[in-house]
Image (cartoon, rainbow, N blue to C red):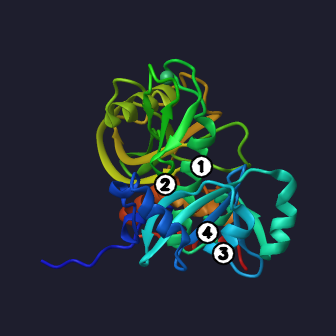
Amino acid sequence: MDRAVQPPLNTFAGLSLVLDRVAELRDESAWIVEQARSPLARYLLLDGAGEAFLHRDRDALRWLDANERERWFGDLRASLLGMAYERPHFLLVADDPARMGELEHALDARRMSLRSAGLLLAADEASLFAYAKGLSHWQRETRFCTHCGAPLLLVAAGHRAQCTNAECARLHFPRTDAAVIMLVEHNGACLLGRQAGWPPGRYSTLAGFVEPGEALEDAVRREVAEEAGVIIDQVRYHSSQPWPMPASLMVGFIATAVSRQIRMRDHELEDARWFTPAQIVDGIADGSFLPSTRLSVSYQLLAHWLRQRAGLELDALTAAATPG
Ligand SMILES: [Zn+2]
């Protein structure tokens, strides 16, 4: 049966639909030089803090072409992101804070964080920005060999770092930290929690990092037990999302609890409680319940649950609560 490709559910996900990372060509330096000089080449520019340059007058990335790259950043190494829309795509990191104002003016651009731009950019550009930000963070943070302490040298078009100590010569690869995020349900209610520093009324699904020796499902059970003392029965995969802030992969689950008994064990949360769909609807309407940002898997898990269990659309509920 033919099935159309589904649009990606989560922001920053779905990059494989538009981008070929051409990992097999990362060591083909002659090919890469040729691509970098091509009139089709596009350069995504990030500053040292991982903010991207967007057009000043529209919500789109301000890509540089090969001429602009040569004029402004002839001395900077570019990392190969891959081929998209039959054009080579590269990452450039401008790490000189003194030049940023000048650059913004010259490129008629503004800088924006991934968190802000993720809500404004088209899905493909948001995903490319996330990929570039994750890669540049790893490059910036991975300067010394974790085995022998010698300086590292970026190789493979920016995707590996090699130890410069010839007796060690270890290769280091970009790392991603897996985190689980889960909507826990029990007989028509879902478990949400809040941290002390959050805006008033903000409740979100529980989440936490996967530990060594742990399967994702085990991490779900442990985190829910630690944060809320709730015992989990079934765990079902929902979706995942790259979350390079700075280096996470969020893996979303729907889990079923055996009971509603809550006992806060690790005090990571200020509060955890069960919400019925009706309580969420009323809370959004009167401003006492604030869901997570639309960018997050947490929002998508809650939206999915409300749709499945109560036929409600979270987008419509939040839009009605915030007119204009
Ligand atoms: Zn080493």
- Disc 1 residue type? Ser
State the residue position of label 4. Answer: 318
Location of residue 119 in the rendering, given as x and y in whole percent from the top left corner: 62, 67
State the residue position of label 2. Answer: 297
Number of residues whose C-alpha sits closer than 10 Å to that of mark 3, classed few (under 14), some (14–19) or many (20 or more): some
Distance between the alpha carbons at the discs numbered 2 and 4: 16 Å
Question: Is the residue 72 above or below the residue 139 in the image?
Answer: below
Distance between the alpha carbons at the discs numbered 3 and 1: 22 Å
- Disc 2 residue type? Val
| Label 2 vs 4, first from the N-terminus | 2
Quarter of the image where the C terminus is located: bottom right
| Label 3 vs 1, first from the N-terminus | 3
Distance between the alpha carbons at the discs numbered 4 and 3: 45 Å
Tag 3's secondary structure? Answer: helix
Q: In the depicted view, which residue is nearer to us: 206 or 122?
A: 122
State the residue position of label 3. Answer: 67
How many numbered circles are shown?
4
Answer yes or no: do the residues labelled 3 and 1 have beta carbons within 8 Å? no
- Disc 4 residue type? Thr
Task: Say which residue appears at 46% left-offset and 69% top-offset.
Answer: 312
Location of residue 45 in the rendering, given as x and y in whole percent from the top left corner: 66, 63
Q: Nearer the viewer, mark 2 or mark 1?
A: 1
Q: In the depicted view, which residue is nearer to us: 229 or 216?
A: 216
- Disc 3 residue type? Asn
Q: Nearer the viewer, mark 3 or mark 2?
A: 3
Return the mark for residue 136: 1
